[in-house]
Amino acid sequence: MRRSVRWAVFAVCLTGAVLFGILGSIFWEKNDFSKTGITLAVTNTVGTEGENSSSGGITLAQAENIRKMEQEKENPVGFTAWREETARVTDEDGFRSTDTTLLRLCGTSEYLIPHGKILGAEDTEGCLLGESTAEQLFESRRAEGLKVLWEGRILSVRGVLREPEDILVVQETKDTTVFNRITLEKSGNTKERARNFKDSYGLGEMLLTHTGESRIEQVLGLVPGKWSDFSGWQANWESWREELAAEAGLEKSILELAEQAERRKAFLFGLGSGALLFCSMGLVLTKSGNS
């Protein structure tokens, strides 16, 4: 291969490797819901539908009572109780309707969705729509300020979310609703704060999931105070294995699925970046061997 061609191919491969690496990091961060907080979930949420189908969780009144008690503390824990289900939503005039994924909240949306407009805890007259849901209702993604009809409530669209695309986010007003997930704000030692929160309010049927820790952080968390503490290693390993097994039995929420989709894209771009970098290094070595 001529030297000029080799250098041109090397430049293309190296540029592609850098570009793919940047795109991979963008997709990795795009729907990083681990930035929002740690989630407690009822262990029997798989396949449940409807307001009162879960035997665990907390009601709207219980969630508001817990919030009041937290606000009286010196270092209160911010949280949002929520549940996910399927619902039909209609435009205000009743011309178009669509089925979408519904998130019923008791608390701010910022603890769940790390980007876009925020639906405040007291905003019972507003909602958030995903781009796909907005297009189904209004034939446009520019739906902010428009109104939708859901369960007899007329709600103003406060913002349109790029991800998840197929979603309606509302503040719950029904006392009978049971929230089977609670997401705590991410601050300090999140897992320890979450366990203390769980124990303080008798949420024994809820387990920690989506802790916001990477696999590397989880592995490092297995290290006991002393490296020679073999019983500590064993106890940490058993605890981690139990957490992974329990989490595997939970149905993934739409937020976690959106995150996983972007992580898969990031992984593919990372592979592409590595392959192009390998090719560029191969050209350099080939050039060195021929010189």
Image (tube, rainbow, N blue to C red):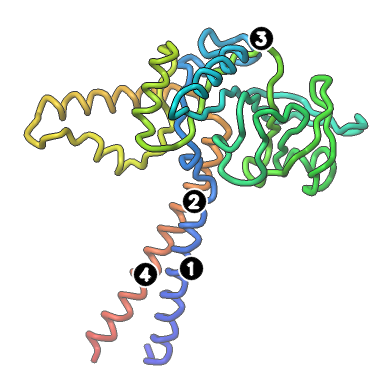
Q: Are marks 3 and 2 in contact (CB under 8 Å)?
A: no
Whole-Å distance between the Cαs marked 3 and 2? 37 Å
Query: Is 86 rendered above or below residue 21?
Result: above
Please name which of the two marks, 2 or 4, marks the residue nearer to the observer. Answer: 2
User: Which amino acid does the dot numbered 4 rest on?
Assistant: Leu
Secondary structure at numbered mark 1 = helix
Residue 140 visible, this angle:
yes
Circle 2 sits on which residue?
29
Instruction: Give coordinates of residue 190: x percent, y percent.
Output: 38, 33
State the mark number for residue 19.
Answer: 1
Under mark 1, the amino acid is: Leu
Q: Of the numbered discs in the image, which one, if any, rests on residue 232? A: none
Element on which disc 3 rests: loop
Amino acid type at circle 3 is Thr
Residue 176's disc is 3
Answer with mark 1 or mark 4, whichever residue precedes in sequence: 1
Disc 1 and disc 2: Cα gap in Å?
Answer: 16 Å
Mark 3 or 1, closer to the camera = 3
User: For the residue marked with disc 2, what is the amino acid?
Assistant: Glu
Q: Counting residues from the N terminus, which is met first, the one under dot 3 or under dot 4?
A: 3
Q: Tags 3 and 4 in contact by the CB under 8 Å rule?
A: no
Q: Residue 277, labelled with which disc?
A: 4
Mark 1 or mark 2, whichever is nearer to me: 2
How many C-alpha atoms fall within 10 Å of the one at disc 3: few (<14), some, or many (≥20)? few
Residue at the (40%, 80%) spot, across then down: 10
